Amino acid sequence: MLEPGDDAPDFELENQDGETVRLSDFDGRVVVYFYPRADTPGCTTEACGFRDNWDDYADRDIAVLGISDDPVSDLAEFAEKYDLPIDLLSDEDGEVATKYDSYGEKNTFGNTYDGVFRNTFVVTDGTVEAVYAGVDPEGHAEEILADLA
């Protein structure tokens, strides 16, 4: 698992609008959060938490990037359905999530498959500032704001 002080792996992924987004395009703080699946209960709770606190993030110049292995079309529907102001990025092969130790074997109801782990990284000017592993989506956006106060 990446730790505070580590270099954050740069990436280039498409967002819900088909636009290319690179971590290196951002100055200052960026919340990079990994979530398993768009439009599922926990992932919706987490994304809507960032949406509901968007003004506080914007006022503090903190960008938010959500990454899953969903295709761009699913991310577009998710963003539109919940009016999400954040960039949702498609990492279909899990390459970026793997670099962030947030992709691997999962087991649900006896089925084993590869998928995204719910982890969050706060990155400041290319360096990992904070790590949240195995995140509880309820109240997570507020937790980050409080920690960064």
Image (cartoon, rainbow, N blue to C red):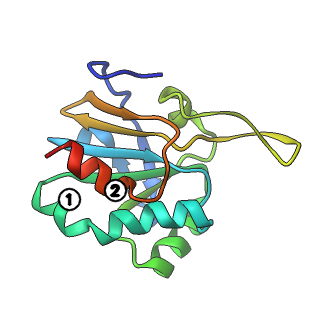
Q: Earlier in the sequence, mark 2 or mark 1?
A: 1
What residue did someone put label 1 on? 57
The answer to whether the residue labelled 2 contacts the one labelled 1, judged by CB atoms less than 8 Å apart, is yes
- Tell me the element at label 2: helix
Q: Residue at x 46, y 78 (%)?
A: 82
> Seen in the image, is 35 located left or right of residue 146?
right
Amino acid, disc 1:
Tyr
Residue 141: mark in rendering: 2
Q: Residue at x 48, y 22 (%)?
A: 1
- Tell me the element at label 1: helix
> Seen in the image, is 11 located left or right of residue 4?
right
Q: Residue at x 29, y 48 (%)?
A: 144
Residue 129 lies, in percent from the top left, at: 25, 30
Task: Please state which of the two labelled residues, at mark 2 or mark 1, is closer to the viewer.
Answer: 2
Question: In this view of the protein, which residue sits in the foreground, 74 or 113?
Answer: 113
Residue 122 lies, in percent from the top left, at: 29, 38
